[in-house]
RNA sequence: GCGGGUGUGGUGAAAUUGGUAGACACGCCAGACUUAGGAUCUGGUGCCGUGAGGCAUGGGGGUUCGAGUCCCUCCACCCGCACCA
């Protein structure tokens, strides 16, 4: 009988559903294990081969853990709120709820074809009211909490109110507090709430009347329509994630993420220690009587290097700095205004990426607080208002950007580090001994830092300061397709709904155009936005709201009393293995880590890190194929006939390079018939200039996307080769963590492997008189030979190690080696094959189930006992040693496994080849590493 | 600009701790079986060289008996940067 993978896979997928094979219960005598994938956004494009990479890896691990005796939670759901559905609605009028429902159905269908072991009874969808009810409730918990700096944890806001009412603060007494109106109280409370409202800058597009995401803005104009975009201040909601900065840093020590991932989070948090220093400003002006006067005020700078204070040659402030207005001099006014207008059109990223130095002098000077030196104050886009104090003291001899700025604008440079500074580039060292530095002279810089700060504090002109690059997280979006805020505004003061009023459902809308003043579409729905108590908040929560806590809901998906019961969350605890892409390195992971910490502080869960171990799957890129059409004709020229240069040419004629669907190309050879029928046969009459008999396509690696025709649909591969082949091929491509372009070429090898495995159980079918005869089962119950056992146990060890360390590509290779060797040995023995099937079950579940039953076993192979490695079967008695002379391999020799250097030396030196290479010389040294190698140094 | 990552045959890759570079596959070449093959099987396949041998892990330098692996330096490409999820 042949390997009829389509029938087998359908059979077992139905079996799994009927027998609830993947149903998971919250009570079990087995130890728990929680394996989670980052859930997908159900895009309209459906699943492509990039999505399942991580899912297959986690599925393998889940099945493996289950076989090893764990109660494994391995759920799946959908991150179904988001911008694309809304964009699509704007374009087509289709309601996001409708498209989302459809897309989820497609995704699920596609996922199920690959044979994942999800317990769909636990599915969550962030856009369903039954789910976002709890997202809203957790928002209320954040809103009704503050971060207690003494205890370094979240506490109910009522504790703070209590404190204000009884003890007051340095800003007000308890009596004053009690006399405050509710609105006045709210102003103070808002400064502490973990979810709070404040003003922030957004990308505002006047023409579209809406706020835009950064990637909707290209070169200062909107992607849609190319309208100008400026920064605008608007009321926004924020999460006070900065309060958790230190705990987010400390928590990294306790989790098993890659070093690079931790590094990225640390950089994002960007903790630095330094000082804030007050610089007095001197701005000359003429008073009414035309006398020269000096205006004076203070600008605070933040620096991590207060030791370089005597090397400050100028100050730079951000174009948005609040002091700009007051310090510009009459003469410079025009230049400054022009410069600021230019900066307004630029994004933060452009401003930092810019290599051309730009800036403008304000006309004012700052006074070095220690020595009274007058330094010019400049404005430049490389200083960002959101970081530090939005003003820096520039030390050109020690900072590269400051140095270039000084050179560019001819600002004299003070050298405070002697010959550590060569005048050609800045030197950021901390090891130099300070010169020209007043009371710091003679000190090594790193020691001078503390001394300088102490002096600043002593003189009251500055203070020690810890700074974070991380900002509080913007938590509102002027959009429709997201969770509504359970907030009502009255006369500028917000009131929260109570938990019992949730969910606050998203009202149905017909149109998605923005509301007045850049508000979200919800502002247009009069009977929803207006309530007797006041106006509802019109913005919605961002995509990461629902995804910040979804891993908790899977534990207890049907609970309608709480977002998760303490019993369920205590049992499942944090996620043991989390798989997803590095693109979430900072955003999603930091937000869910913060939410987890808050919920822990408030006592709702018993752990404060959500993910114990994180594995990042690489990105699957597309491998695009191109055809070349002679400009203005319908004739296509094969790739290698074209000369490439500034443009493509064929016999002096210009050639246009065009994407062609990668699925119509076998390797590099275009299927011309398919191509003619492509896109309703628009190339029906095309002519081809071939090389040999073939049309060869061009190749390039690009992002996988529909518009580049380089997407490959897993459904097609499952139909053609089967899910088991597809799963194993995705793993065989290379390490899970590595990014790589998809290429279907090569899948045959894995498919052949499964067919070869099949032939260990069934004899081949054959044709006689035009009729196919079925092969019969050929497995036997004979006892295995030591050689066969050796193959098996070698494989058990390898698969176990490789699965544990996520080296699935080498595991697949080990299966191939195993089956090749068993085939060579003509081993059809149940005793051996049975165990191979159990090992294989996580990787190729359908064929493993089928053959497991062919061998006469009942039920699912997942309930079998995992084979145990026995080293007795794999012991070798001798070892083939590589023998090198001067590090170059010259021969190999066999020695007993226990042979020592003294046993080996005479034999090696007597060897013919060794003799030849020694050329009669005496060896200087013989290096013998037991079980590794032999090297003779001459 | 800042941060992170990757560079090994024609291709995907392997080499887990500094110890036989290229396992396992794809592709290609030769052959067997077959009415037929997009089935199956056998052998070969890093590069140069008839050969002995030499050269090879992005380039250059270093440490070491020994480097794909460690150190320095340069180059190329990919990803992220706060309203895409």
Image (cartoon, rainbow, N blue to C red):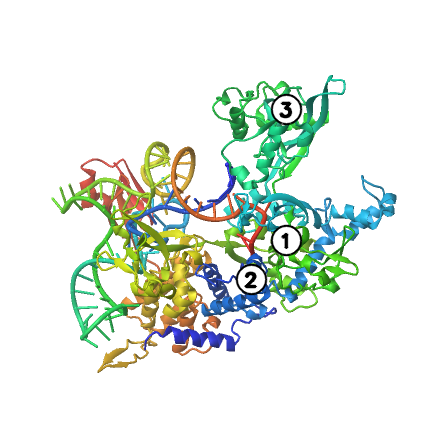
Q: CA distance from mark 3 to mark 2?
A: 67 Å
- The residue furthest front is A632
Vertical position of residue A725 compared to residue A208: above or below: below
Q: Nearer the viewer, residue B54 or A410?
A: A410
Q: Could you tell me which residue is drawn at 57 percent across and 30 percent down?
A: A359
Give the percent coordinates (x, y) of residue A856: 40, 79
Is label 2 on the same chain as label 1?
Answer: yes
Q: Is residue A333 left or right of residue A33?
A: right
Residue A842 in view of the camera: yes
Which mark is nearer the camera, 2 or 1? 1
Q: CA distance from mark 2 to mark 1?
A: 32 Å
**The residue marked by circle 3 belongs to what chain?**
A
**The residue marked by circle 1 belongs to what chain?**
A
Q: Which residue is mark 2?
A: A34
Label 3 Cα neighbours within 10 Å, binned few <14 / some 14-19 / many ≥20: few
Give the percent coordinates (x, y) of residue A596: 64, 55
Which mark is nearer the camera, 3 or 2? 3
């Amino acid at each position: 009988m042949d390997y009829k993978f389509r029938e087998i896979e359908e059979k077992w997928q139905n079996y799994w559903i009927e027998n609830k094979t993947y149903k998971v219960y919250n009570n079990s005598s087995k130890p728990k294990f929680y394996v989670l994938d980052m859930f997908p956004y159900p895009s309209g494009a459906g699943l492509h081969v990039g999505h399942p990479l991580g899912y297959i890896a986690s599925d393998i691990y889940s099945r493996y853990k289950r076989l090893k005796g764990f109660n494994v939670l391995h759920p799946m759901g959908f991150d179904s709120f988001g911008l694309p559905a809304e964009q699509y609605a704007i374009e087509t009028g289709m309601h996001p709820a409708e498209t989302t429902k459809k897309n989820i159905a497609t995704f699920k269908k596609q996922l199920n074809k690959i044979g994942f072991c999800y317990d769909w009874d636990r599915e969550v969808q962030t856009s369903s009211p039954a789910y976002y009810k709890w997202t809203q409730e957790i928002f209320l918990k954040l809103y009704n909490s503050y971060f207690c700096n003494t205890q370094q944890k979240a506490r109910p806001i009522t504790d703070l109110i209590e404190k204000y009412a009884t003890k007051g603060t340095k800003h007000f007494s308890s009596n004053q507090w009690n006399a405050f109106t509710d609105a006045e109280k709210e102003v103070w409370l808002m400064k502490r709430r973990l979810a709070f409202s404040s003003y922030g800058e957004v990308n505002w597009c006047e023409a579209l009347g809406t706020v835009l995401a950064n990637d909707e803005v290209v070169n200062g104009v909107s992607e849609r329509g190319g309208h100008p975009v400026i920064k605008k201040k608007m009321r926004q909601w924020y999460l006070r994630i900065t309060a958790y900065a230190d705990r987010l840093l400390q928590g990294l020590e306790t989790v098993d993420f890659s070093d690079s991932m931790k590094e990225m989070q640390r950089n994002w948090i960007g903790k630095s220690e330094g000082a804030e220093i007050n610089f007095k400003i001197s701005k000359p002006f003429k008073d009414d009587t035309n006398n020269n006067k000096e205006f004076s005020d203070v600008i605070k700078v933040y620096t991590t290097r207060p030791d370089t204070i005597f090397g400050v040659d100028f100050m730079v402030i951000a174009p948005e700095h609040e002091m700009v207005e007051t310090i510009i001099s009459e003469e410079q006014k025009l230049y400054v205004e022009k410069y600021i207008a230019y900066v307004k059109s630029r994004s933060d990223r452009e401003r930092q990426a810019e290599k051309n130095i730009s800036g403008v002098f304000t006309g004012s000077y700052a006074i070095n607080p220690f020595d009274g030196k007058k330094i010019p104050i400049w404005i430049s886009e490389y200083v960002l208002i959101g970081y530090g104090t939005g003003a820096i003291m520039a030390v050109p001899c020690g900072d590269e950007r400051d140095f270039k700025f000084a050179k560019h604008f001819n600002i004299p440079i003070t050298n405070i580090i002697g010959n550590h500074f060569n005048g050609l580039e800045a030197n950021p060292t901390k090891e130099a001994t300070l010169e020209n530095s007043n009371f710091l002279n003679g000190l090594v810089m790193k020691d001078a830092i503390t001394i300088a700060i102490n002096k600043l504090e002593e003189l009251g002109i500055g203070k020690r300061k810890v700074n974070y690059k991380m900002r509080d997280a913007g938590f509102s979006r002027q959009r429709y397709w997201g969770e509504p805020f359970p907030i009502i505004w009255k006369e500028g003061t917000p009131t929260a709904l109570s938990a019992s009023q949730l969910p606050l459902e998203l009202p149905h809308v017909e149109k998605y155009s923005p509301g007045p003043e850049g508000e979200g579409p919800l502002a247009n729905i009069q009977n929803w936005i207006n309530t007797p108590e006041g106006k509802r908040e019109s913005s919605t929560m961002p995509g990461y709201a629902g995804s910040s806590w979804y891993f908790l809901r899977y534990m207890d998906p049907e609970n309608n009393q709480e977002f998760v019961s303490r019993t369920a969350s205590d049992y499942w605890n944090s996620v043991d293995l989390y798989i997803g892409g590095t693109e979430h390195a900072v955003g999603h992971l930091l937000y869910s880590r913060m939410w987890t910490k808050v919920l822990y502080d408030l006592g709702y869960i018993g752990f404060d890190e959500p993910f114990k171990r994180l594995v990042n799957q690489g990105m699957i890129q597309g491998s695009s194929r191109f055809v070349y059409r002679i400009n203005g004709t319908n004739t296509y020229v094969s790739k290698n006939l074209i000369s490439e240069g500034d443009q493509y040419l064929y016999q002096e004629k210009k050639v246009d390079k065009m994407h062609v669907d990668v699925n119509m190309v076998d390797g590099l050879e275009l299927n011309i018939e398919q191509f003619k029928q492509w896109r309703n046969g628009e190339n029906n009459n095309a002519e081809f200039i071939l090389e040999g008999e073939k049309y060869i396509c061009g190749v390039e690696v690009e992002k996988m996307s529909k518009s580049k025709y380089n997407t490959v649909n897993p459904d097609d591969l499952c139909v053609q080769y089967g899910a088991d082949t597809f799963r194993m091929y995705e793993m065989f491509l290379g390490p899970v963590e590595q990014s790589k372009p998809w290429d279907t070429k090569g899948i045959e090898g894995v498919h052949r492997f499964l067919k070869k495995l099949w032939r260990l159980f069934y004899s081949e079918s054959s044709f006689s008189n035009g009729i196919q005869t079925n092969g019969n089962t050929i497995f036997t119950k004979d006892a295995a030979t030591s050689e066969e056992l050796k193959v098996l146990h070698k494989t058990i060890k390898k698969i176990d190690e490789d699965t544990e360390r996520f080296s699935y590509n080498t595991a697949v290779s080990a299966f191939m080696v195993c089956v090749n060797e068993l085939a060579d040995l003509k081993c059809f023995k149940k005793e051996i094959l049975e165990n191979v099937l159990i090992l294989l079950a996580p990787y190729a579940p359908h064929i493993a189930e089928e053959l497991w039953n062919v061998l006469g076993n009942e039920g699912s192979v997942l309930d079998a006992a995992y084979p145990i490695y026995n080293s007795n079967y794999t012991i070798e008695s001798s070892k083939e040693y590589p023998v090198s002379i001067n590090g170059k391999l010259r021969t190999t020799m066999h020695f007993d496994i226990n042979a020592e250097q003294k046993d080996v030396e005479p034999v090696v030196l007597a060897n013919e080849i060794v003799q030849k290479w020694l050329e009669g010389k005496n060896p200087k040294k013989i290096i013998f590493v037991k079980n590794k190698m032999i090297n003779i140094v001459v």
